[in-house]
Amino acid sequence: MLGLPALVAMLSMVGYPLFEAVRLSLYNYRITDPGARSFVGLDNYRVVLTDALFWSDMTTTLLLTVSTVVVELVLGFAFAMVMHRIVIGRGLVRTALLVPYGIVTVVSSFAWRYAFALDSGFVNGWLGLADFSWFGRRESSLLVIAVSEIWKTTPFVSLLLLAGLVQVPEDLYDAAKVDGASAWQRFVKVTLPCTRNALLVAILFRTLDAFRIFDNVFVMTSGAHGTESVSFLAYRQMIGRTALGLGSAVAVVTFLAALLLAGSLLLVGKPDLDQAER
């Protein structure tokens, strides 16, 4: 009961925009010509699901999601173990690690864009690639977008995993050492099983967040050279073409895809609720 007001406020903030998106997706509606609005039912969804551009953008989104989340988990686990074991300067290390996460995504995206720019960037000078245009082709553009996303959100993953590491009893490590287990065996047999729930939470949160990637794409490439994500496609339809109905349909399909992805992760991960309660 104490959480009911917060729940009602959250549902109101999330539920109303979602309801409006579903309602608008059933109409052929351009904001520049509101008088010509007409009900088309599921026709906008048919257009979206049969459009090759949507599936191309979905592939790009999944590629960015999988690649960034995998790298973030590896780096995040490494940073979490360092923060967990370090004794001297623990607070300073944790604060320094969180600096990228505290920077607004748009600001960090601009910084990365200028760093890799052909005319004003310094990365080419470091790598000896004077005439290489990172944003001139799909592969290198996606690489820069992924790197910027990994740099910013790895601290968030490391914090979630650190919370899981804190819950691992030291007695288990001591017992494993007595049994002659190596550092790798202790990591595989003790650390990973005991941080399973934290891992699942980190994967779930970051996957859903990465799936709606927009800022990096908007700032760095504006969707050029096959780097457009589904969120950017929805933005381009609604804002660029003022097609609220079609853009809303893209947004709703993206939302349903995210729900399906989250459900699949929970089904595969099978969180241990008993362990979470303890």
Image (spheres, rainbow, N blue to C red):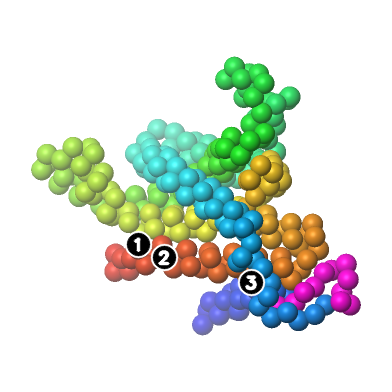
Q: Amino acid at mark 2?
A: Ser
Q: Secondary structure at mark 2?
A: helix
Q: Residue at x 68, y 54 (%)?
A: 232
- Tell me the SS state at disc 1: helix
Check disc 1 and report the residue beneath it. Answer: 269
Looking at the image, tell me whether mark 2 or mark 1 is earlier in sequence order. 2
Residue 61 appears in the figure: no
Q: Relative to residue 263, is residue 246 drawn left or right?
A: right
x and y percent of residue 95 in the render? 52, 40
User: Which quarter of the figure has residue 39?
Assistant: bottom right
Of pointers 1 and 3, the one earlier in the residue sequence: 3
Q: Which residues are magenta?
A: 26-36
Residue on which the image places disc 2? 264
Query: Tags 1 and 3 in contact by the CB under 8 Å rule?
Result: no
Position in image of residue 72 (x %, y %): 46, 44
Give the vertical position of 234 relative to 68 (above or below): below
Q: Which mark is residue 46?
A: 3
Viewer-side residue, 46 vs 14: 46
Q: Residue 77 location, x and y as percent?
A: 39, 44
Q: Is residue 83 above or below residue 10?
A: above
**Residue 194 placement: quadrant:** bottom left
